[in-house]
Image (cartoon, rainbow, N blue to C red):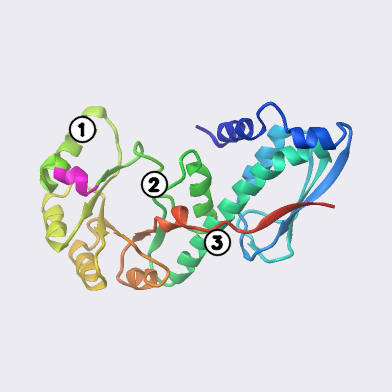
Amino acid sequence: MTTSELIRLALQEDIGDGDHSALACIPAEAEGKAKLLVKENGVLAGMEMAKEVFHQVDPTFELEWKMKDGDEMKVGDIAFYISGSSQKILQAERLALNIMQRMSGIATLTKEYVKLCEGTKAKILDTRKTTPNFRLFQKEAVKIGGGVNHRMGLYDMVMIKDNHIDFAGGIEAALNKVESYLAAKNKPLKVEIEARDLNEVEEILRVGKCDRIMLDNFNYEDTRTAVKLIGDKYETESSGGITLDTVREYALCGVDYISVGALTHSSVGVDLSLKAV
């Protein structure tokens, strides 16, 4: 589903058979102007999504953009002005704000993680721990904050995790089954497999047949050991409860990627407001 389709559904959910508050209070012919006011420091995200919201509500809106996605914003900044039907501005207000506040929160948190990894090769990844039907927006916000998207869903990468390994009958069995499946389906997907300890890393290295090894809940010492064992044979990814306090130390271990579920499931929205002018 595209962002345009998601926005269309979100507008239907919000407006229903009409914005009766605005319809009752404001004459249909009334014209107005409003500004997007920044009330908290952070990284701005969601401008393109807000543009689509406004376009779908009323393509005749006049928009004056003062900032762009990825800009560092501070309290008092004006991101944009919107002019047009007062009724329609109010119809679009909440959805545009909801998207921008949440995306800006994700971009802001992602930027913090990215900055802490400066000087290392580690890239910050998101995960599938996203809000249903809001994933495209959340993952775009991660990119705006300087992070990298992991797989978008279950369909664009094979990720063999602990349950897959256990249900399949072990690491070798899982990797062999994936190899056979992808060949039969003619799907050139990358394969990542989770290792729970150094013994599993060694077994994965013996079997091969993957592109990336995830080091799940490894401590720093074991991460460094695993990175040396793997060398440049496969990409490496640290995962599992990594926070702002620990991310740099993991980055210094030499991994290629660090995945952080908190980017999307625990970020706090940035305070933004649409105010009449």
Q: Residues within 10 Å of mark 1 (few under 14, many from 20)?
A: few
**Front residue (pair 39, 23):** 23
**Residue displayed at 43% across by 69% down:** 244
Q: Is residue 77 left or right of residue 217?
A: right
Q: Is residue 66 left or right of residue 235?
A: right
Residue 99: horizontal and vertical position, in percent? 60, 47
Residue 3: horizontal and vertical position, in percent? 56, 37
What secondary structure is marked by label 2?
Answer: loop
Q: Main secondary structure of the magenta part?
A: helix
User: What distance separates the C-alpha of mark 2 from that of mark 1?
Assistant: 23 Å
Residue 52: horizontal and vertical position, in percent? 66, 38
Disc 2 marks which residue? 128
Q: Amino acid at mark 2?
A: Arg
What secondary structure is marked by label 3?
Answer: helix
The nearer-to-camera label among 2 and 1 is 2
Residues rendered magenta in the picture = 161-166
Q: Is residue 245 above or below residue 268?
A: below
Is residue 14 something one can see in this rendering? yes
Q: Amino acid at mark 3?
A: Thr
Q: Is residue 112 above or below residue 66?
A: below
Q: Is residue 228 left or right of residue 146?
A: left
Which is more N-terminal, label 3 or label 2? 3
Which is more N-terminal, label 1 or label 2? 2
Is residue 58 something one can see in this rendering? no
Q: Amino acid at mark 1?
A: Tyr
**Residue displayed at 23% across by 34% down:** 182
User: What distance separates the C-alpha of mark 3 from that of mark 1?
Assistant: 40 Å
Disc 1 marks which residue? 181
Disc 3 marks which residue? 108
**Front residue (pair 274, 188):** 274
